[in-house]
Image (cartoon, rainbow, N blue to C red):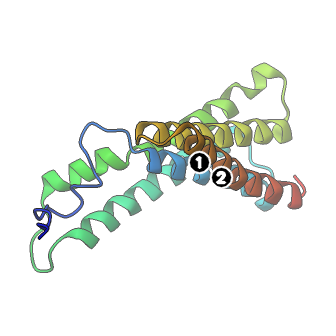
Amino acid sequence: MTSSPAPTQPGRARLRPGRTDYAGAVYGSLLAASVVATAGASGNFPRLQLIGLLLVTGVVFWAAHVYALVAGERVVGRPVDRREVRRVARHEWSIVEAAVLPAVAVAVSPLLGLDLAGTAWLALSVAVAQQVAWATLGAVRAGASRRMAIGEGFANLLLGLVIVAAKAALGH
């Protein structure tokens, strides 16, 4: 006879304190890449607006994830536990952090002599590269074999290339 695992508080198994949220970092990187890829479809964004768009979008999606996890995992009728909200918010912060490197790429692009189109491609490249790196590192940290980790990286590269193709199709 097998014993069932002990019940845990909602989200405890997935949200381990002090651990990097690799899934959130991958998600945030995909989000940043999507923002860069589609920003030009609405017109040319000056660098400061693109930096703001990246960071604000990261914060909004972070807040949405925090809300969804807290609201979705609490028992109906019980009040929201502020400690749980803070714990979830810290855990999901990697969504915001993933917007930082693409924003930095936008900020330093003038030093590289890039125009707005080159700036967007640089930021998109940074977002896709970090997405692949986070996915691969997350697989390694989870104990995946080398082959599985490479597969994770490759799958995320393909996802990133879909965004690159969308940017190219949008003509900017």
Residue 130, visible in the rendered structure: yes
Secondary element at tag 2: helix
Identify which residue is drawn at 45% across, 44% down: 22
Against 37, is 101 above or below? above
Q: x and y percent of residue 28 in the render? A: 52, 49
Contact? badges 1 and 2 (CB < 8 Å): yes
Q: Residues within 10 Å of mark 1 (few under 14, many from 20)?
A: many
Q: Residue furthest right?
A: 171
Query: Which residue is farthest bottom?
Result: 77
What residue is disc 2 on?
155
Q: On the picture, is 59 further left or further right than 146?
A: left
Farthest-out residue, front: 1
Amino acid type, label 1: Glu
The quadrant of the rendering that contains the N terminus is bottom left
User: In this view of the protein, which residue sits in the foreground, 3 or 169?
Assistant: 3
**In the rendering, which numbered label is found on residue 152?**
1
Name which residue type carries label 2. Ala
